[in-house]
């Protein structure tokens, strides 16, 4: 026990000292912030472009067969009304005006046509912005605010659905259990490689013989697995916390729908099942990655296995529509019960609410037993493969009698 | 003196190749034992089997009357032939980690580590990453780790390999100190002057078999009073010639 806590402390502290850990942990939220920032700025720039129309300095000619564009508004932007499209196009071609806008009689049959003098790849869209602005503002001038709100969908709908006489919102119900699926995906995707190579360092640094004569290999492997899970959860927290804070603070600016997190339903049984599946799955795949790492001599060789593990874990995502639309199909049942493919179907179907009680009763023990077997094999492989500095162990050697 | 190490009828095969053939010998408590042989004669394999890293094909290998187990009561210090440490960690962190694994408290491990570093004039390197040290400096750190728990049994696989004479003397002095404190030392070395200087008894291994075994004087007498260096050349010289011919 003393040595287990020593191993966990050593492994956690030395990983937290690594720059790569923090780059990975902080890099993800920073990247997301950059993506959302660009999206926000882009959206704002479009609004600003339309809003700053009065400041645009280019000449405009307009033909309005729709009779919807307000003449006062046209005058305010110094647009000149002309009678034919041909003349407008000709004036643009000859450089007499910078742009010409043609509004057809019926927008459902013909497009609004815009012709303009080339400025550059980014600024040519200003003519189109002006055309839209003139039309929407003109129509808006003759419409009440109430109708405008309806037309622009500036309203909300509060819907209530019932199941067994109780208020039931399937979307909100799946949010908290679904978080465990997202967390599992992120942890394996971002931390998988570290799990895979965690035991290789001892081999590559040739420190293995000193380790094996100082500490039980079982204690070392279990200590490594516990510290990997703690570190993965910590990294997950560092990744997700800024996203949640960002959502709470900036959801309006990002035009994201507001979900009142305090009003989310807490389905105790579904959340409990998600927690158990999440930890059993994490234990199974951490053990599997450590097992693979223990059986090969170098990090380079271990790297070639990560794709196979990822395929097992995330391959079932290709059947995601089946999990929801045909939860009782044999394929879905097989993927749900086979331990190496089970995490995603189990977590997803549990979140959606179509996981049967008997499937829970079978799948969870299968996951836990599989995790125990894999960890025992990882210990054995580390113990006997440790001195194989130049070759990987065969499956026969891992499973064989000693 | 009772036996701290007892190896009886030990054989070891890797696939169809038998590398150790019916080897038997004892190491007595408190003595310094020279485990000698040319490269590939089976010394490291025997040590690894003795320490439970290899499962013997047949025979028994005991320390203090039972197969070695990390959780057992033997205070072991083992310096393997394959040298290595956690290279990305600081010297002091690695030493304290191993000290704690050997049962010391964090403060004891720290104190002993700093004392050792001071002794080998590396105290200014305590907070430097191991990878920044030279090979010889890393070897000293490994010896410090090996001896940190005041072992009753020291198994040293070529402890002075690659050292200059000054550092070799420093390391031999450290080993002698543990010897004087009562530690049993089993040492693999190719430096015959070290054997002459330190060992009570020796075994010469050739092709996985015991070729000569006894006190240094007995072995010398067996070879007509030759020096150990000459004995080594006599026993293994033809082997090297064979290798050269075969090559």
Image: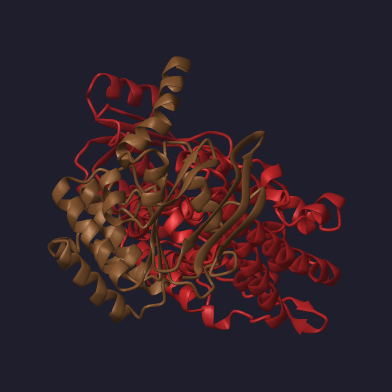
Chain colours: A red, B brown
Q: Quadrant of residue B108?
A: bottom left
Most foreground residue, A84 or A164: A164
In this view, A164 is above or below A311: below
Residue A143 located left or right of residue A343: left
Most foreground residue, A333 or B53: B53
Residue A66 located left or right of residue A358: left
Tally of numbered discs: 0
Most foreground residue, B34 or B126: B34
Q: How far across and down, in percent of the image, does residue B55 sit? A: 62, 52
Q: How far across and down, in percent of the image, does residue B136 sit? A: 22, 49
In this view, A37 is above or below A174: above
In this view, B64 is above or below A195: below
Q: Which residue lies at the image location 25% right of the left edge and 19% below the top edge? A: A94
Quadrant into which the C terminus of chain B falls: top left
Q: Quadrant of residue A98?
A: top left
Most foreground residue, B163 or A98: B163
Q: How far across and down, in percent of the image, does residue A314 sit? A: 63, 50
Residue A263 located left or right of residue B191: right
Residue B128 located left or right of residue A311: left
Q: Is residue A288 visible?
A: no
Q: Is residue B82 visible?
A: yes
Q: How far across and down, in percent of the image, does residue A398 sit? A: 67, 48
Q: Which residue lies at the image location 44% right of the left edge and 15% below the top edge? A: B245
């Amino acid at each position: 026990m003393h040595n287990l806590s020593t191993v966990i402390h050593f492994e956690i502290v030395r990983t937290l000292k690594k720059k790569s850990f923090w780059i990975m942990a902080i890099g993800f939220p920073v990247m997301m912030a950059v993506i959302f920032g660009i999206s926000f700025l882009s959206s704002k720039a479009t609004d600003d472009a339309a809003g700053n129309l009065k400041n645009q300095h280019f000449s405009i000619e307009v033909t309005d067969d729709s009779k919807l564009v307000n003449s006062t508004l046209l005058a305010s932007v110094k647009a000149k009304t002309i009678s034919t499209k041909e003349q407008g196009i000709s004036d643009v071609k000859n450089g007499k005006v910078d742009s010409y806008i043609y509004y057809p009689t019926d927008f459902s049959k013909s497009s609004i046509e815009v012709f303009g003098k080339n400025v550059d790849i980014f600024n040519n869209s200003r003519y189109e912005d002006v055309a839209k602005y003139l039309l929407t503002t003109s129509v808006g001038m003759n419409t009440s605010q109430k109708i405008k709100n309806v037309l622009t969908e500036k309203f909300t709908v509060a819907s209530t659905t019932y199941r067994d006489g109780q208020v039931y919102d399937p979307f909100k119900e799946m949010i908290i259990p679904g978080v465990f699926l997202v967390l599992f995906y992120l942890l394996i995707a971002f931390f998988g490689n570290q799990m895979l190579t965690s035991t290789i360092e001892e081999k590559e640094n040739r420190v293995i013989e000193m380790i094996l004569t100082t500490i039980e290999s079982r204690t070392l492997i279990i200590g490594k697995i516990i510290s990997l899970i703690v570190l993965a959860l910590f990294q997950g927290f560092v990744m997700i916390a800024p996203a949640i804070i960002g959502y709470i603070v900036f959801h309006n600016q990002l035009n994201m729908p507001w979900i009142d997190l305090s009003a989310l339903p807490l389905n105790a049984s579904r959340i409990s099942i998600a927690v158990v599946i999440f930890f059993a799955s994490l234990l199974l795949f951490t053990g599997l990655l450590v097992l693979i790492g223990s059986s090969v001599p170098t990090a380079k060789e271990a790297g070639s296995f990560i794709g196979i593990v990822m395929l097992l874990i995330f391959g079932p995502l290709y059947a995601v529509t089946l999990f929801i639309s045909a939860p009782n199909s044999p394929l879905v049942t097989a993927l749900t019960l086979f331990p190496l493919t089970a995490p995603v179907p189990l977590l997803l179907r549990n979140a959606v609410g179509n996981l049967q009680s008997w499937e829970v009763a079978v799948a969870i023990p299968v996951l836990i037993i599989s995790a125990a077997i894999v960890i025992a094999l990882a210990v054995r492989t580390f113990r006997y493969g440790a001195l194989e500095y130049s070759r990987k162990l065969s499956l026969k050697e891992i499973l064989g009698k000693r | 003196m009772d036996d701290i190490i007892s190896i009886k009828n030990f054989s070891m095969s890797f696939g169809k190749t038998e590398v150790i053939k019916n080897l038997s010998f004892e190491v007595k408590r408190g003595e310094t034992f020279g485990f000698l042989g040319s490269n590939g004669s089976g010394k490291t394999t025997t040590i690894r089997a003795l320490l439970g890293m290899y499962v013997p094909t047949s025979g028994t290998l005991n320390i203090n009357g039972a197969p070695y187990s990390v959780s057992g009561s033997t205070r072991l210090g083992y310096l393997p032939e394959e040298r290595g440490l956690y290279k990305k960690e600081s010297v002091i962190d690695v030493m304290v980690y191993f000290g704690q694994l050997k049962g010391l408290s964090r403060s004891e491990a720290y104190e002993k580590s700093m004392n050792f570093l001071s002794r080998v004039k590396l105290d200014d390197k305590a907070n430097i990453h191991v990878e920044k040290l030279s090979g010889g400096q890393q070897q000293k750190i490994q010896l410090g780790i090996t001896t940190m728990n005041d072992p009753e049994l020291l198994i040293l696989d070529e402890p002075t390999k690659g050292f200059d004479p000054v550092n070799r003397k420093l390391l031999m002095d450290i080993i002698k100190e543990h010897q004087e404190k009562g530690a049993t030392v089993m040492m693999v070395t190719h430096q015959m002057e070290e054997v002459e200087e330190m060992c009570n008894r020796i075994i010469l291994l050739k092709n996985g078999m015991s070729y000569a075994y006894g006190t240094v004087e007995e072995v010398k007498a067996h070879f007509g009073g030759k020096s150990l260096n000459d004995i080594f050349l006599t026993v293994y010289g033809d082997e090297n010639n064979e290798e050269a011919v075969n090559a």
